Amino acid sequence: MAAIATSDAAYDLLMRLLAVTERVIAANPLAGAALFTLFAALSGMLAFFSSAVIVPVAVNAWGPTRSAALLWIGWVLGGACAYAIGRVLGRPMVNRLARDKLARYEQKIGREAPFGLVVLFQLALPSEVPGYILGLVRYSFLRYIIVVALGELPYAIGTVILGDSFLNRRVLPFIGLAALAALFSTWAYSRLHQRLEAKAPALPPEAA
């Protein structure tokens, strides 16, 4: 995105496309908001969907505040759906969607996991993974929704700020915010694994 923002030709093309989408959304405001929220929800359930690519469209059409709210609602709904998939459809479906993560975290993030640890779990991994695993282990749905709402809010705000910086060609703030988000995610991932390693029981010494 930074490369597009610094290229006059690419940026002008993108702005023309945004102008077209803005007219479509203006003609169908409720449908446009519902479609954006649905896409955000899908990105909260499926790794190959990313709502970040359409955030500039939303910011251009609705402004940062409403875009952040719609993005956040969509992500929370997506998290709830991922939880429901894990809880209702169970292990075969979670194996298909998050096989590599399941074996790694299922035994460490259980039904009675502390709230703070689950918040770190949500912050550190792609948002769909905690939903599938916490649904599978039958973690409290109410506590999970609170975790998702708290965990996704800063990411929704940050993503919209990035989209707004991109639209206004503020390249340095865009790069700085992207770097800050990457550092925060790295810290959360590192802190999560520190907590999980500290929580793991010590192995007995081998017999001589």
Image (cartoon, helix red, strand yellow):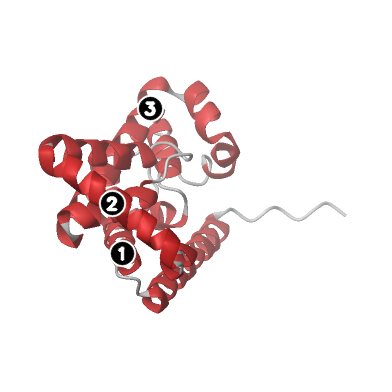
**Which amino acid type is shown beneath numbered disc 1?**
Leu
**Which amino acid type is shown beneath numbered disc 3?**
Ile
Q: Nearer the viewer, residue 78 or 86?
A: 78
Quadrant containing the N terminus in the rendered view:
bottom left
Question: What residue do we see at 19% from left, 52% from top?
Answer: 61
Residue 9: image location, x then y, percent: 43, 62
The Cα atoms of the two marked residues, 3 and 2, are separated by: 35 Å
- In front: mark 2 or mark 1? 2
Q: Which type of secondary structure does the marked residue at label 3 adopt?
A: helix
Q: Which type of secondary structure does the marked residue at label 1 adopt?
A: helix
Q: Earlier in the sequence, mark 3 or mark 2?
A: 2
Which residue, as the protein is rendered here, is positioned at the far right? 208
- In front: mark 3 or mark 1? 1
Q: Which residue is mark 2?
A: 18
Q: Which residue is mark 3?
A: 85
Question: What residue do we see at 31% from left, 42% from top?
Answer: 40
Q: Does residue 113 appear left or right of residue 186 in this picture? A: left
Quadrant containing the C terminus in the rendered view:
bottom right
Q: Earlier in the sequence, mark 3 or mark 1?
A: 3
Which residue, as the protein is rendered here, is positioned at the far bottom? 172
Q: Which residue is mark 1?
A: 167
Label 2, residues with CA under 10 Å away: few <14, some 14-19, many ≥20: many
> Above or below — where is 105 with respect to 59?
above
Q: Are marks 2 and 1 in contact (CB under 8 Å)?
A: yes
